[in-house]
Amino acid sequence: MELRKIGFSKSTYSEIIFSVRLKERVNAAPMGVLLHDEEKVCLKIYKGGKTYDMILNGAEDCVLNITRDPVLFYKAVFEKDKIAYHPAKHVSSPRISGCNAYVECSITNVTLHEKYIEAVLKPLLIDVADASVKTYNRAGPAIIEALICYTKLPYVKDTQEEKVEALTKKMLIFRDIVYHSTKNSMLRRIASKMLEEPSAASKQKPVKHPT
Ligand SMILES: Cc1cc2nc3c(=O)[nH]c(=O)nc-3n(C[C@H](O)[C@H](O)[C@H](O)COP(=O)(O)O)c2cc1C
């Protein structure tokens, strides 16, 4: 299934840039999206933002712009006016230029909650630049960062207590990120295991850490 092939999952949030049009208004913002069923995706949009307003006021379609470019994510928060758009093929909302894949969607269902709305989207067109394109998710990078901390522990454990504390604190934060961004039990187990087994780190050979 195409959505799964490009990284969308029921258990792990895909971080994408959501572009939407309502009449002459266009907006973009980073959002986390889950597979809803095999043919739809869903997202929670918290109160107070432009995306929330535009969907609540009747926006009918959107584009999930897939990129791993941190500068584009930055622009979608801080410099929205510097984002370059081009027309989509099946929807009125525009695509963000420079992304690796586009999922053009109609907004099929919106449920109002106290602090957010939940929107269900039906993909109408999935346009992928090449077969290797995958959505960005937070769990993988957080695990790799935690492993970097873990493998630094042997070099400081005997002499620098404050560095051990700092590394452990970071690993706790990375574990939190994993738990917030995925329900995948293997990824969660990996993130927890590192903190449960500090003794394993001390068995590593203390040669100079490469990073
Ligand atoms: C990677 C990333 C993912 C995000 N996911 C969500 C989300 O799922 N729902 C949400 O309401 N805000 C999310 N945000 C926060 C919004 O993007 C942020 O509040 C943005 O400024 C809203 O812009 P807007 O006012 O143009 O809608 C996310 C931010 C980032 C950086």
Image (cartoon, grey):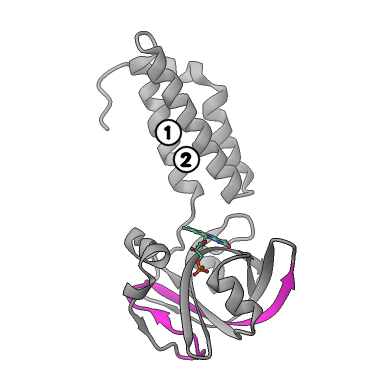
Q: Are marks 1 and 2 in contact (CB under 8 Å)?
A: yes
Disc sitting over residue 147 in the figure? 1
Vertical arrangement, residue 47 with respect to residue 108, above or below: above
Left or right: 71 with respect to 135? left
Q: Quadrant of the N terminus?
A: bottom right
Rendered image quadrant of residue 147: top left
Please name whichever residue, 58 or 122, is drawn nearer the observer in this view of the structure: 58
Q: Quadrant of the C terminus?
A: top left
- Residue 174 seen by the camera: yes
Q: Is residue 156 magenta?
A: no
Rendered image quadrant of residue 46: bottom right
The residue at 44%/84% (across/down) is 94
Please name whichever residue, 47 or 200, is drawn nearer the observer in this view of the structure: 47
Rendered image quadrant of residue 52: bottom right
Q: Position of residue 122 (x, y in %)?
A: 63, 80
Instruction: Give the distance between the C-alpha atoms of the residues marked 1 and 2, in whole angstroms.
Output: 6 Å
The answer to whether the residue bearing label 2 lies less than 8 angstroms from the nearest atom of ligand 1 is: no
Name the residue tied to disc 2. 143
Q: Position of residue 200 (x, y in %)?
A: 48, 19
Left or right: 164 with respect to 178? left
Q: Amino acid at mark 2?
A: Ile
Please name whichever residue, 140 or 16, is drawn nearer the observer in this view of the structure: 16
The residue at 47%/40% (across/down) is 143
Q: Position of residue 78 (x, y in %)?
A: 38, 63
Magenta stretch bounds:
89-112
